[in-house]
Amino acid sequence: MQNASPYAGNEIFIDREFSWLAFNQRILDEALDNRNPLLERLKFLAIVASNLDEFFEVRVAALLQKIESSVTVDGIAGLNAQEKLDVILKMCQKMVRHQYRCWNESLLPEMGNHGIVLRSLSDLTPEEERYLQNYFRKEVFHLLTPIKVDPAHPFPWVLNKSLCLAVILKEEVGGRKREDLGVVTIPRSLPRVLPLPTREKGFHFIFIYEVVQRFIDQLFKGYQIGYCSTFRATRNSNLYLEEEEGSSLIDAVEAVVHNRRKGDVVRLEIDRNTPKKIVDALVKNFDMEPTLLFKVNGPVNLNRLMELYRQVPLRTLKYEPMLPAMPYHFHEIGDVFDAIGSRDILLHHPFDSFDPVVRFIQTAAKDPDVLAIKQTLYRTNEDSSIMYALLDAAELGKEVVVVVELKARFDEKSNISWARQLEEKGGTVLYGLVGLKTHAKLSLIVRREEGRLRRYAHAGTGNYNPETARLYTDMSFFSSHNDFTDDVSEVFNYLTSHSKKPDFRTLLVGPVNFLSETLKHIEREKRNALEGKPSGIAAKMNALFDKEVIEALYDASQAGVPIRLIIRGICALRPGVKGLSENIIVKSVVGRFLEHSRIYFFLNDNNPQVYLGSGDWMERNLRERVEVLWPLRDAAMVAQMHRILSTYWSDNSKVRIMKGDGAYFQPQLGEDEASFNAQEFLAKGVEELPPQVSLLFPGLTQIHKEAHEADAAQSFDAGAEEVGESEEEKPKVQIEKAT
């Protein structure tokens, strides 16, 4: 029986959905920030729209289901479900208004100043009109299906998030005037933004829906065309799946993905000038509450603005290109196995190239000495060089085992496709554990060297996706140490054999020991603080949303442990509350790159213990997913993590600081204070910290002084790492106590 929480009431937690909306507001702030290049601001605005899509598809959809199922309380904060939904919808309406104000009053005029012009139907020249008419007849007309809604033709099924037109059709029948509704869906195969040839300078575009509006009379011939409006329906996209039922998990997921498009409508976006007759018809057809209706002042679905970002080639209006560094050991040594065999290697993407990760798998696929490759797959790109390498390896007869997560939301279809292809090539594909998502990022290579087997492993905080590796900050770790590769092997056995008692020597694995070991580390810092020893916790993650961990952090704070949290998104903890969390500070950094790395730093009486991995301190990561975190034992790597955390903590350009009520604010710079952008600094690859960076734990200066010596000394004899042999000595971090 679990002990009851010592905290009375639920006021000590921030609601998940409210915190998520605060995160999306921070992204919207970047769209409003004129320090960012103009087209990057446009991109941030598109990301806000895309995030809201998922928020409605998943979070709002789930809340609506709970209300329909008569669930009265929702979330960690214990709020009334209906009241919570009402507040969420008001917050979303306000956010959408701010989005369109940003578009209409800021971005659109500034784009015009740079020669990027969004044309409308009213200002087309005769030449442009002829061009669009020709384009419509050749490229658009035959893809459209006009549907008149009447007793013989019911309202058509509208696909999730598809852009549609609703038009009033007027005719005279038997001397009486009549109005009906027509509907046209614009196929996703058509570009949402069409470049216009023009003699004027700059880049001129028109939205595809305006082209269809202009010539819609060619679709509904014989009718007088009344008002024509755009609309877009967002549907419930949660997976409904009983894993224990059905012939196989892959068949079940495949069926659910197919049916996902048929979910209930959870949001309707429509042009704000749409006549009431059309609005009422749509609301009635979708059987939805009017509160789910969003009338917008501009183009429906601002996510389509991403196409403008891609089509405008003005580099001066985008971030300067960043060339990732090729890590020294891969560059100088060349052979990936020689490089990893000589030392552990840690990479920080995107500042360090992701190419070594790709080469690791590609080299293993072609190497005749490699006998087996084991790999987890959560998300990857559709044209994945890593997956092609695994297909080649399977075709060459190597033992290829891939654990595929079929329930990676919105990537199920791609993962199913790769799984089918790999099975056809002779690879072994498994789908993880029933009831648990496989979120760990692991690769294991087994190679025969001089008559013996040797293993090489990679672990990451991010997915095996070279595309997102250029946009997300993540960590990669390579090692051939026996204790590390033993544990990686144990993880794969746990996934494939459903081992009941897995035994991990160094790794924290969810749901086996991730939570329990995390709580032990927090408790140790609390004990150290009470005993007057150096204590402290610094952690960087995507989200903090676990009641038990938060309560442990509150206890540690009350014992005097300084806790510094860098949390990109959701945070249910209330920082800086007197008597509860006054020693906890929470910051969020939103910038050019999506902060995705997870770093957990425990001071441990000035002998730091540091873990990197795939899991956040969220209930689902700690209890419902297979996650893997690995320790850093090398002094130079520990020092590197301390520097990275301190760098982010010292950011005063893209940082927001969380208040106890869940709101965030951006600190104002003093008159003599220089602006410091952590991501820009890390992109430069400079090792020496600038004066703006203050170390989180100044007592660890010794670790920075000795880092280069430890880095040079951290190598080991390859022969000691053969399978079946033990290490004689493991590198350890020894830090002198601060005086």
Image (cartoon, rainbow, N blue to C red):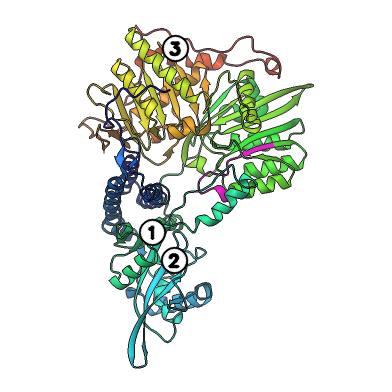
The residue that mark 3 highlights is 607
Choose the circle earlier in sequence order: 1 or 2: 2
Please state the horizontal and vertical placement of residue 650, each as a whole percent of the image. 33, 28
Image quarter where the C terminus lies is top left
Image quarter where the N terminus lies is top left
Choose the circle earlier in sequence order: 2 or 3: 2
**Relative to residue 73, is residue 582 depicted above or below?**
above
Residue 335 appears in the picture as rendered = no
Q: Which residues are magenta?
A: 401-414
Kindly identify the amino acid type of the residue bearing the numbered disc 1. Answer: Asn
Q: Nearer the viewer, mark 1 or mark 2?
A: 1
Tell me the crowding category of disc 1: few under 14, some 14 to 19, or many 20 or more residues within 10 angstroms, Cα based. Answer: many
Instruction: Find the distance from the CA under tag 1 to the CA under tag 2.
Output: 18 Å
Farthest-out residue, left = 671
Which residue is drawn at the image coordinates 60% and 29% (left, top)?
A: 458
Instruction: Find the distance from the CA under tag 2 to the CA under tag 3.
Output: 60 Å
The residue that mark 1 highlights is 301
Kindly identify the amino acid type of the residue bearing the numbered disc 3. Answer: Asn
Magenta stretch holds residue 700: no
Kindly identify the amino acid type of the residue bearing the numbered disc 2. Answer: Pro
Residue 6 appears in the picture as rendered = yes
Q: Nearer the viewer, residue 732 or 562?
A: 562
Question: Is disc 1 placed on a helix, strand or loop?
Answer: loop
Left-right relation of 623 to 199: right
Quarter of image, res 460: top right
The residue that mark 2 highlights is 195
Please state the horizontal and vertical placement of residue 604, each as a whole percent of the image. 42, 13
**Relative to residue 535, is residue 260 depicted above or below?**
below
Question: Is disc 3 placed on a helix, strand or loop?
Answer: loop
Tell me the crowding category of disc 2: few under 14, some 14 to 19, or many 20 or more residues within 10 angstroms, Cα based. Answer: some
Q: Nearer the viewer, mark 2 or mark 3?
A: 3
